[in-house]
Image (cartoon, helix red, strand yellow):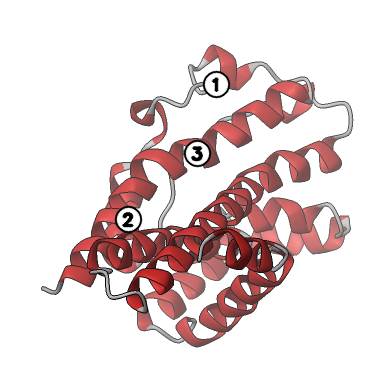
Amino acid sequence: MTAEDVLKYGTKLMIIFMCTPIHEFAHAWAAVKLGDETPRYQGRLTLNPLAHIDPLGAVALFFAGFGWGKPVQINPVRFKHYRRDMALTAAAGPTSNILLSLLGIIFYKIFYRVYYVQLFSGSDPQAMYYVTLIFYYFTAINIGLAVFNLIPIFPLDGEKILNYFTGKKFDSFMRRNQLYITVGFMILLVSGILNKPLGFVQGKLFDFIDLITSWLDPILRSIIK
């Protein structure tokens, strides 16, 4: 195992114990703000990893690169606007991952600039290279989690977001065939067929986040010389 592999799996552990709790906390926080106190009563309005980590989901994230936390239970009858508030609560999780990826790419750019300057100044840049790599993996994995959870298949967040835009006939069809659709999705996922399209979307989102933080690049070039 290379040093890069160690850093990659170490970053995955960081994601499991830090970003997964933030993802699930975001669901809980959104639900409470929209009128449902169920997550608070169940102890989910916390950043404590033990309250949010699902063992199977953590193992899947560590080895397969995708995973999930313990689902936040909500009582939708407490929402004033059922479809809208369900969608907002579901969207809060992936949104937290996108915000974390924004934070990650900012640190990535800062440390990459330091690494670049050290590389051409005769200093040993190895330590800075590893730090840069950690933030690259941190950004990429959070983007991957956001994209994965936005897939509109039960029980992922994307399914609840999609329901905001669909009608009763479509919802009824999805409920009747939920088991078959979910099993089919898992087969496609495990077989690797979805790797290429998911990777394409993740790459485009990474490029977009890189683009909207491009304002930082000239600032770093002028400060870190």
* Res 179 seen here: no
* Residue at 68% in and 63% down: 213
Q: What residue type is labelled 2?
A: Lys
**Which quadrant of the structure image shows residue 141?**
bottom left
The residue labelled by disc 2 is 12
* Of callouts 2 and 3, the N-terminal one: 2
Q: Which amino acid does label 1 sit on?
A: Leu
Q: Quadrant of the N terminus?
A: bottom left
Residue at point 81%, 26% (across, down): 79
Residue 61 in view of the camera = yes
Whether pointer 1 and pointer 3 mark residues with C-beta atoms closer than 8 Å, the reply is no
Nearer to us of marks 1 and 3 is 1
Label 2: state its secondary structure: helix
Per the image, the residue denoted by label 3 is 71
Above or below for 107 versus 205? above
Sequence-wise, the earlier of marks 2 and 1 is 2
Q: In which quarter of the image is residue 159?
A: bottom right
Which mark, residue 173?
none
When asked about the image quadrant of residue 193, the answer is bottom left
